[in-house]
Amino acid sequence: MKYRYLRRIHLVLSLGAALPLLLLSLTGVLLVYGHELQDWVSPEHWTAEAPAPDAEPLPYSEILERIRAEKPDVRVWSFGIGRDPDRAWTLWLADGAGILNIDPYTGTILDHYKNDESPYGFVVALHRRWLTANPTITPGIRHFISFISLVLIAQVLVGLALWLVPAKRMSRLKVDFTRKPRTVVLRLHQLSGVATAVILITLAFTGMSLYWHGPIEAAVETVTGQEIRKREEPDMTGIADIRDIDAAVAVGKSAFPDQRVLHFRAPQPGKPLSMGVGGEDKIKVNQVWVGDDPPRVLAIDHADDLDAANWFWRARYWIHTGDFMGPVVRALWLVVAILPALYVISGLWLYLARRRARNG
């Protein structure tokens, strides 16, 4: 009786969330290697070859001057530099003017586009908000997508219960390809679900955390008994605005001389220059705020002293994308990303096959 009840719940959840899960799963597969696919499709927009092995990028001020000369109507909001010296810099523009890809060695604008217009950005927009940009509708869709992630967690837990309730649990994980197709599909369905349950729950939970900040933050703090600290900008009252961007970035980097500048917000009136400085570890990125004229460091948020709650909170995006422990994990994430779609298809096929057998 308990088994039939669980199976009915499993079926109802599958039917209710089938199409959203298919979309999330298939777009998630593309996003695991999304940047690499984008580079392959249009390398001229995303790569920047250094003219010499020891060549240095142009000063930030000179890059800004070249942009002003070519596109006087735009204002740069932030610089995305990254870790790869052969990759174009990504400059986000203010007032919804889009994004510029820049060759940092020549100052050449490689591409000017809106985020959803790039191949990767299009798939991200489809995955995260179903391509909507309406400020009224989009939040509701994001809540719905988070709810679907919660349904996926419930599906995994119910599936585990379906495996645990009957006897001979381990024998039901053996796949014998000489058996009937329905039995083979059922065993593959069960085996893959049990083997990847923790990863699937992790993917769904980290996906939820990107939208449901408050509830997930509270859950993490409750489980760990630790408080997630906020990165708060220093007060700029009585502090002059930055006039020399090159000097300001150099001052900020001097706080971590052995690391590289990964991104920073261009100077804005009444705001400090906010920088991300780090090494090879994508999760441990230090935040540095610089202000005043001449520039000085106003505050530092160190990433080396992260407890479990704060490490997870900063790592959740990288965990969700699988880009945090090398190529093996990314390859595994690619396989796991397709599983929800396969579970929907195989689950519905098993249900229909069971109905046909019962009625035949």
Image (cartoon, grey):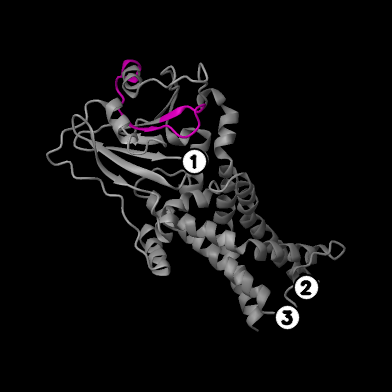
Mark 3: give few (<14), some (14-19) or many (20+) Cα within 10 Å.
few
Callout 2 amino acid: Ser
Callout 3 amino acid: Ala
Q: Tell me, for residue 167, which label it has, or none.
A: 3
The magenta-colored residue range is: 67-90
Residue 315's place in the image compared with 66, above or below, is below
Whichever of callouts 1 and 2 sits on the residue coming sooner in the sequence is 2
> In front of the other: label 1 or label 2?
1
Q: Tell me, for residue 171, which label it has, or none.
A: 2
Which of these two is toward me, 315 or 197?
Answer: 315
Where's residue 315, x and y in %?
Answer: 46, 52
Q: Residue furthest left?
A: 238
Q: CA distance from mark 3 to mark 2?
A: 9 Å
Residue 160's place in the image compared with 282, above or below, is below
Whichever of callouts 1 and 3 sits on the residue coming sooner in the sequence is 3
Asked whether, in this view, residue 182 is left or right of residue 260, the answer is: right
Q: Which residue is mark 1?
A: 280
Residue 188's place in the image compared with 63, above or below, is below
